[in-house]
Amino acid sequence: MNYRTLNSLSLIAMLLLSASGITLAQSQAAKSQPKAAVPTAQPVVTFIELGSVNCIPCKAMQPVMKAIEVKYGEQVKVIFYDVWTKEQAHFAQLHKVRLIPTQVFLDAKGVEFFRHEGFFPEEAIDDLFQRQGLKLRVKS
């Protein structure tokens, strides 16, 4: 074999070995990648509270929202918008708020199924949610 053929064969062998090494490294990296987290259940209800941290009835809704989050867990997504701030004022217009606090309840498809204006007692929200088929995770 001449020198040129030997160099060509050596080059081909090195390319094949490095290609198989890259493939092996990629295979090992793929195995060590953590599995994607199993998606959590979608909330059955989205509870949107449109109010302000500077409004007395709105402040009274804060512990109610926290209790709802605890009692219903992943079944309910609770969102609070302070519509008296410049950054979140547009949510009042989006949800056609006439006074605060206003609670808007959306089903799993994002369709409004209930609305309430003013302070909304926790027990009344429980009744509403149970009529929607939600189950208490924790009793208060």
Image (spheres, grey):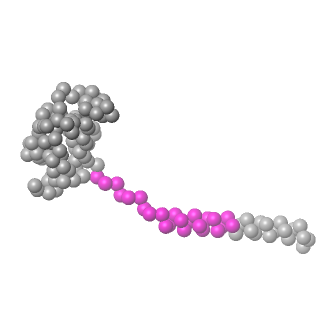
Q: Quadrant of the C terminus?
A: bottom left
Identify which residue, 108 or 116, lies in the foreground. Answer: 116
Question: What residue span does the magenta drawing correspond to?
Answer: 18-41
Q: Residue at x 24, y 52 (%)?
A: 74
Farthest-out residue, front: 54
Q: Residue at x 16, y 41 (%)?
A: 59
Residue 121 in magenta stretch: no
Which x, y percent locates residue 57? 13, 37
Farthest-out residue, bottom: 1
Classified by dominant secondary structure, the portion drawn in magenta counts as helix
Q: Quadrant of the N terminus?
A: bottom right
Residue 38 in magenta stretch: yes
Farthest-out residue, right: 2
| Position above or below: 117 against 125 | above
Q: Is residue 18 left or right of residue 82?
A: right
Question: Does the image show residue 84?
Answer: yes
Which x, y percent locates residue 15? 73, 65
Identify which residue, 47 or 37, lies in the foreground. Answer: 47
Q: Residue at x 52, y 63 (%)?
A: 30
Quarter of the image where one finds residue 7? bottom right
| Position above or below: 54 against 8 | above
Which x, y percent locates residue 54? 19, 37
Quarter of the image where one finds residue 10? bottom right
Which x, y percent locates residue 22? 63, 65
Q: Residue at x 49, y 67 (%)?
A: 32
